[in-house]
Image: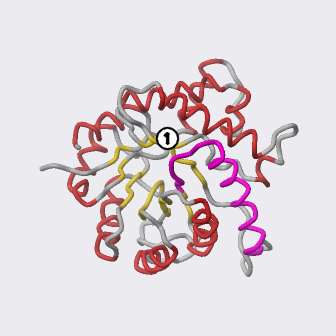
Amino acid sequence: MEHNVTLMDGATGTRLWALAEAAGYARASVWTYNLTHPELVKSVAEEYIAAGSRLLCANTFAANGPEVARVPGMNVQEVVAAGVRIAREAAAAAASPVDVALDVGPLTAMLEPFGDLTAAEAGQIFAELLAAGTDAGADCIFLETFTSLEMLRIALAEAKRFSLPVLCSMSFDKSGRTLMGDSVADICAALEAGGADAVGMNCSFGPAAAVAVIRDFAAHTRLPLILKPNADVGAEEFAALLAPVLPLVHYAGACCGSDPDYIRAIAKRI
């Protein structure tokens, strides 16, 4: 059977921390390594490309204004532009075509009425990161690990201003809903209306539980599907557990705790 699946990458943060520890560097927010240790960031990108990744996430996941402001001397524009540039350099040297996704995660502050963050403030924070990454040459935008559909809708609205494909992924608990109680049906309806180019799940848990969630997505939308669960088991078992649903998805990879071995194992299946 022929599968039209784009192979994504694996974990960036845990992999970078492992390499930093081996090199004797202090553990820090991984986006800071774009400026302090760019050779580590490029090394991780090259590892995933060598393993078979054809859509590489830039090291920009949590590089938003409030988080970057915690580190003196750094700003969003420099951090995000460096993350995209490093990924593009690795992609340019690859033997096969590799695209670079601007990786955007949720904000740590909660939206009103559960927190003090207004929708307008959240939109401005996302817009700053998105502008920096798209100006640096990202091929698409990956909004990932969101647990609030409302926050993802805000990020999606901002992302659609940049005329790039936007992939949207949420994290779930084992009930099949997000932390804020959003169902797959509600997510699909809202993201389709918002103009998402692909939808799905990442992080959350391992592949065994992820299979049920992605089947739920397949039942509620015709948009391309994203599947990027946590490692949870060894690489070969991980890929074996994903195999039955690979014909349903268009983007597959691995999340927290994974490394290039997981991407190689998925590559064998597709």
For residue 245, side relative to residue 115 (left or right): left
Residue beneath the point at 59% across and 30% down? 41
Q: In this rendering, is residue 105 above or below 184?
A: above
Image quarter in which the C terminus is found: top left
Image quarter of residue 33: top right
Which color mode does the image show?
Answer: secondary structure
Query: What percent of the width, then of the height, locates residue 223?
Result: 36, 68
Residue furthest to the front in view is 163
Magenta-drawn stretch contains 128? yes
Residue beneath the point at 87% across and 39% down? 72
In the image, what residue type sits under mark 1?
A: Ala
Residue 144 in view in this figure: no
Query: What percent of the width, then of the height, locates residue 224?
Result: 35, 62
Query: What percent of the width, then of the height, locates residue 195?
Result: 49, 71
Residue beneath the point at 29% across and 67% down? 215
* Residues in magenta, as a range: 118-142
Query: What percent of the width, then of the height, locates residue 44?
Result: 52, 29
Q: Circle 1 — which element?
A: loop
Which residue position is annotated with label 1? Answer: 11
